[in-house]
Amino acid sequence: MEPEGVPRETDETNEPPADNGAERMDRCAPAAKKIACLIVAAVLVFVAQRDLRKRPSELVRGRVGVWKVVAMVGPGAVAYLLFGRRRAAPTITTPDLIDA
């Protein structure tokens, strides 16, 4: 019989493993990463398709129809947003000198 107040030594093989949440996060992390990547890809596709609808064809490098097909997937949308758009010519405004 052991004296009171002294903790009893336990066999480590009989104890259930400590669940600190780290193992659960390791199991959930791949699914969460996939979901986050899908959301980012969907947003990029949406932005690219919207830009192709609104942008005049003169400001698109190449054919708009080809870019619409290419931009239906994430990497194609990134390619369009980086390389498929031309910058609009800056508009120069001159002050009105006639009102003197």
Image: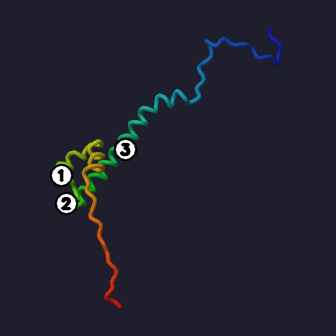
- Number of marks: 3
Quadrant where the C terminus is found in the figure: bottom left
Residue at 35% x, 41% y: name it.
38
* Mark 3: few/some/many CA within 10 Å (<14, 14-19, 20+): few
The single residue placed furthest to the top in the displayed view is 1
Horizontal side, residue 30 vs residue 46: left or right: right
Distance in Å between CA atoms under marks 3 and 2:
30 Å
Asked if residue 84 is positioned above or below residue 55 in the image, the reply reads above
Return the x and y of residue 65 as percentages of the image width and height: 16, 51
The residue wearing badge 1 is 62
Element type at mark 1: loop
CB-based contact (under 8 Å), mark 3 and mark 2: no
Colouring? rainbow
Return the x and y of residue 62 as percentages of the image width and height: 18, 51
Asked if residue 6 is positioned above or below residue 88 in the image, the reply reads above
Distance in Å between CA atoms under marks 1 and 2:
9 Å
Element type at mark 2: helix
Pick the residue in front: 14 or 55: 55
Horizontal side, residue 24 vs residue 45: left or right: right
CB-based contact (under 8 Å), mark 1 and mark 2: no
Horizontal side, residue 30 vs residue 52: left or right: right
Residue depth check, mark 3 versus mark 2: number of the one nearer the observer: 2
At label 1, the amino acid type is Gly
Return the x and y of residue 17 as percentages of the image width and height: 59, 20
Mark 3 / mark 1, whichever is N-terminal: 3
* Mark 1: few/some/many CA within 10 Å (<14, 14-19, 20+): few
The residue wearing badge 3 is 39
The residue wearing badge 2 is 58
Residue at 55% x, 29% y: name it.
22
Element type at mark 3: helix
Asked if residue 56 is positioned above or below residue 38 in the image, the reply reads below
